[in-house]
Amino acid sequence: MNGPQDLGGQMGFGPVAPEKNELLFHAEWEKRALGTTIAAGAMGAWNIDESRHARESLRPADYYSSTYYEIWIKALEVLLQRHGFVSAADLANGRAVDPAATPKRVLRAENVPTVLAKGSPCARPVETPARYKAGDRVRTRNINPTNHTRLPRYARGKQGVVEAVREGFVFPDSNAHGKGEAPQWVYTVVFDGSEIWGRDSDPTLSVSIDAWESYLEPA
Amino acid sequence: MAARVRALETILTQKGLIDPAAIDAIVETYETKVGPRNGARVVAKAWSDPDFADWLKRDATAAIASLGFTGRQGEHMQAVFNGDGAHNLVVCTLCSCYPWSVLGLPPVWYKSPPYRSRAVIDPRAVLEEFGVSLPSDTKIRAWDSTAELRYLVVPERPEGTQGWSEEKLADLVTRDSMIGTGLALQPEAA
């Protein structure tokens, strides 16, 4: 979706502001937000693509005025309600008043090291051979889906070169919406800065994205 | 927001859906175990051991796992090497994808609109804001982490560090140098 998350090339946000004495967390609640988000995700009711889509589905004004952990929490409330774990009444009361759906699993403290060290690999076998090889010229499709996608707007309809054939990865555009993993080959595609930003682009710039096969067509 | 997060944790705990001790364990992991020291060890080893550097180029996931760094947001790794007039910069314009297994949790600026919007269109100006000025003919490559590959930049090894141990070299490897918004420290700065 052409949502607030799709920031590449946008203007007006001001300079990057690295902090001098950077803190890992800027408030105690941020720690709980991180942990609650990961622990709730570990219930197995949704996948990373669905959670990314919940975050980018915040209204743009809300997204841009929220810190990243605030975005996480707002999206987490949506996901928990969508999957029947939390009700509007629970949230209004600040305590559990309604019954919850049964999770696939509950993350216990003793399992945290194993779960974090394992992660969630998204590589899957793909039945068909890769359509493109390194060196092939390709064009990204000009698509504007209303669903989740990982093809940024700035890189649509642009000509580039396949630099590497990666693996078969779960397809977010499908997986975010409960439509299955539908894995596809993923390619690193590199574009000249001028192809994306025009003739005023920094001549030394190139930009790459990792693109699922269906984002591409031969050029 | 503090009250809102506390309420959510309370509700989920009361329903038996989360274990507050698991949250403590998650936070402790990223506060004390998983952070940019991991990545610095990878880079220092790559600087010291050409076979390891070669392995890191070909199969970063396996090479990094051999040092014990695996897991969440590091399942599929790719190392990109600075040098020969080329500089790499990593961003996630669409969210906040970042190689947690080697760098820990991303800094606020990495997740914020100024960096995410400008890293792909004007990386030189972004670098200047980090105090990094590259020669005008250095080729800049911005890697937008749009899929589940996570990128680790291997900065150039500073001059004057011949014979240094991996441990000593690792002290020169800053977190920002592994994102591409910084360079490795000079020996006299370590």
Image (cartoon, rainbow, N blue to C red):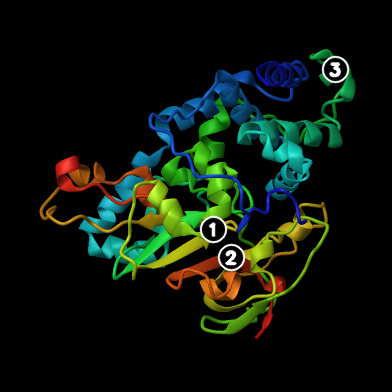
Which numbered tag is attached to residue A210? 2
The three-letter code of the residue at mark 2 reads Asp
> Where is mark 3, residue-wise?
A92
Residue depicted at x 35% and y 63%: B81
The residue located at (42%, 64%) in the rendering is B59
Residue A87 visible in the picture? yes
Give me the chain letter of mark 2.
A
Residue B149 image label:
1
Looking at the rendered structure, the kind of residue marked 1 is Leu
- The quadrant of the picture occupied by the N terminus of chain B is top right
Quadrant of the rendered image containing residue A97:
top right
The disc, 2 or 3, on the residue closer to the chain's N-terminal end is 3
Q: Is residue B56 above or below residue A20?
A: below
A11 versus A212 height, above or below = above
Residue A101 numbered mark, or none:
none
Name the element at disc 1.
loop
Q: Is residue A192 visible?
A: no
Alpha carbon distance from label 3 to label 1: 39 Å
Q: Residues within 10 Å of mark 1 (few under 14, many from 20)?
A: many
